[in-house]
């Protein structure tokens, strides 16, 4: 089945530094990947839609200069949290849709990245 | 916009009992619904889905019921096991938008 790998699973960084999170589709190609943020005991909040070869589409209220998304290939999307602050601490999750299956909404999620900014 | 909520934040059951997790949605245009299971520290895992042209769908030990009249769906888990303990999310999507909106989540606790 479709597998999405996310790395790192946990990261601790100092305030003001940047952190890059990778999302890879291991056994399929994905023109579209999604990035979510989840606070403790909360639901998933869509941050942005990552499109291979083009700019990401950000949801309202998400700072595109703060959360840089790059989808350089059909199997890799990266989320960079720039100038991180403690309030950026959260669980970040990516998901991906196999190429040509946009109508199939049950797409695969990565295992998530726990970011802690100190 | 879409608003999806869950009736109870926590559901406790005994091992072997059947579990029912409920979800309400607000957008009558929603035509695709998905249930996900999320274990602690992990990403959501697809359980089962249903389209609006159906009112019931069964999987292995799970059944999803959809009532479009009252905009409500439920996830039934038969013979609940300790491994079923997790947070369950419902999600709804509308025609033309392939990005589902997630509900708040229900924490299922299974007591041995």
Image: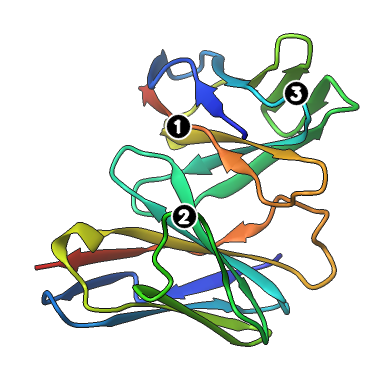
Sooner in the amino-acid sequence: mark 1 or mark 3: 3
Looking at the rendering, in which quadrant would you find the N terminus of chain B? top right
User: What element does badge 2 sit on?
Assistant: loop
- CA distance separating discs 2 and 3: 28 Å
Vertical side of A117 occupied by B78: above or below: above
Instruction: Kindly check if marks 1 and 3 are in contact, taking CB atoms under 8 A apart as contact.
Output: no
The extreme bottom residue here reads: A72
Q: Any mark on residue B28, and which?
A: 3
Circle 1 residue:
B104
Judging depth in this view, the residue of B106 and A51 nearest the camera is A51
Q: Are marks 2 and 1 on the same chain?
A: yes
User: What element does badge 1 sit on?
Assistant: loop
- The image shows a total of numbered marks equal to 3
Q: Quadrant of residue B51?
A: top right
Judging depth in this view, the residue of B2 and A28 nearest the camera is B2
| Dot 3 crowding, Cα within 10 Å, few <14, some 14–19, many 20+ | few
User: Which of the chains bears the disc numbered 3?
Assistant: B
Vertical side of A69 occupied by B65: above or below: above
| Dot 1 crowding, Cα within 10 Å, few <14, some 14–19, many 20+ | many
User: What element does badge 3 sit on?
Assistant: loop
Q: Quadrant of residue A77?
A: bottom right
Sooner in the amino-acid sequence: mark 2 or mark 1: 2
Q: Any mark on residue B6, and which?
A: none
Give x and y (percent) for residue A69.
Answer: 48, 78
Visible residue check, residue B77: no
- CA distance separating discs 2 and 1: 15 Å
Circle 2 residue:
B43
Give x and y (percent) for residue B108.
Answer: 42, 26
- Residue at left 26%, top 66%? A115
Give x and y (percent) for residue B55.
Answer: 83, 19
């Amino acid at each position: 089945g479709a597998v999405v790998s996310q790395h790192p699973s946990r990261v601790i960084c100092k305030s003001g530094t940047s952190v890059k999170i990778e999302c890879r589709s291991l056994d399929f190609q994905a023109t579209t990947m999604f990035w979510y943020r989840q606070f403790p005991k909360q639901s998933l909040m869509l941050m942005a839609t990552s499109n291979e070869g083009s700019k990401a589409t950000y949801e309202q209220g998400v700072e595109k200069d703060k959360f840089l998304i790059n989808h350089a290939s059909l199997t890799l999307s990266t989320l960079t949290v720039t100038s991180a602050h403690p309030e950026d601490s959260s669980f970040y999750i990516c998901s991906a849709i196999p190429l040509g299956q946009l109508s199939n909404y049950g797409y695969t999620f990565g295992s998530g990245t726990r970011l802690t900014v100190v | 916009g879409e608003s999806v909520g869950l009736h109870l934040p926590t559901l406790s059951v005994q091992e072997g009992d059947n579990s029912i997790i409920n979800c309400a949605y607000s957008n009558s245009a929603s035509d695709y619904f998905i249930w996900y299971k999320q274990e602690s520290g992990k990403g959501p895992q697809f359980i089962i889905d249903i389209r609006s042209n159906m009112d019931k769908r069964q999987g292995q030990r799970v059944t999803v019921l959809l009532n479009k009249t009252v905009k409500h769906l439920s996830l039934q888990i038969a013979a609940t096991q300790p491994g079923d303990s997790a947070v369950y999310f419902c999600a709804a999507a509308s025609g033309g938008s392939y990005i589902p909106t997630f509900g708040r989540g229900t924490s299922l606790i299974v007591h041995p």
